[in-house]
Amino acid sequence: MRYKKYVKKITETLEQYKKEVDTLEAGLLLGKQKLDAKTKEMEGKWTEEYIQKYRINNNPDINCKARFQGLRAWAEPIILHYLEEIKKSLDQYFNAPVKVDFANKITTIKLSGLQLTDLEFSILQEGATSYMERRLLNQLAESRTKEASVAKAKDNGQIEYEKGTVKDPYIHLDLPNIEEIYEAFNNYKRAVTGLLYSYAGQNAKMAHLLDNKTPDYVAINMDVYFRKDEAGKFSTIMDQANSILPENKIKRELTENDKRLIDILINPQYPTLARDKVIKIAQCNEDIGELLRLDERYKDYLQDEES
């Protein structure tokens, strides 16, 4: 799954966002101190009504809130975009297509009741390269039976053996835990959006400026993304899934039609132009981007861009 680039981009954006918010909070506190000092000097020289009006007109909250909203407006589309890309990558990973010939084999074996030998089953395993193909094969394995010596007790208590069928003690192919992975993504997303929408500085002194009216005692804990290394926890679970079923195993090889399509889109005679075009096409069209990642001529361009 291509998640490392996206997590990295989110983390970098949140680091900059948090830094700017913390700076803004410090400026707000300094501004309030200066305002308090100024209005204190005005006491006895100006009417209380004028002083209150001065406080309202020069309240640093006004400028601070506008800048606070501006920071969120900058960070929000970047963060939401990469969260969407992670979700899309997850969905594609688990919904990778089942090859027609593989599905036909499984269906034929089930309908015919054909009992595969261990070697035949092993060969079939090699063809199961996507999540759903492995799920289908595991289901088939559960129904496998093997001829074996079955022990039966006689009325006299003696044991005799005769030929019979028993369930094949086949160990299932390992599969990524789909529930655990989506739960991890949802937890990661909550940590990301919590910092984006409810963080109000190291001391939560800007909580009253948040649009969602998050209480200050809640806002002060919204930097959990960094304190509890939510990016690291999420990446660990993704790494475990990738080690069980690497994404490149669920990708197909280029067909002749794929190659012809790529040659129509890109001219390899001009490497510099080709590189720019490959990157641009991959950014605009995920399906063609997948094909380009399988093309030996162009895959390095995309790997360099995503590293």
Image (cartoon, grey):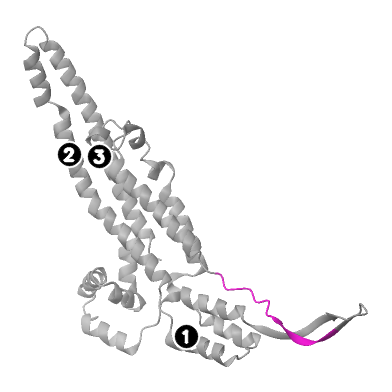
Residue 81 versus residue 216 in the image, above or below: below
Image quadrant in which you'd find residue 152: bottom right
Find residue 20 and name its label: 3
Find residue 175 and name its label: none
Distance, label 2 to label 3, CA atoms, is: 10 Å
- Residue in the image at 36% along x and 83% along y: 254
Q: Range of the magenta residues?
A: 161-174
Residue 53: x percent and y percent?
8, 21
Q: What element does badge 1 sit on? A: helix
Residue 99 versus residue 180 in the image, above or below: below
What quarter of the picture does the C terminus occupy? bottom left
Question: Which residue is identified by label 1?
Answer: 103
> Farthest top residue?
44
Residue 138: x percent and y percent?
56, 76
Q: What element does badge 3 sit on? A: helix
- Residue in the image at 67% along x and 80% along y: 168
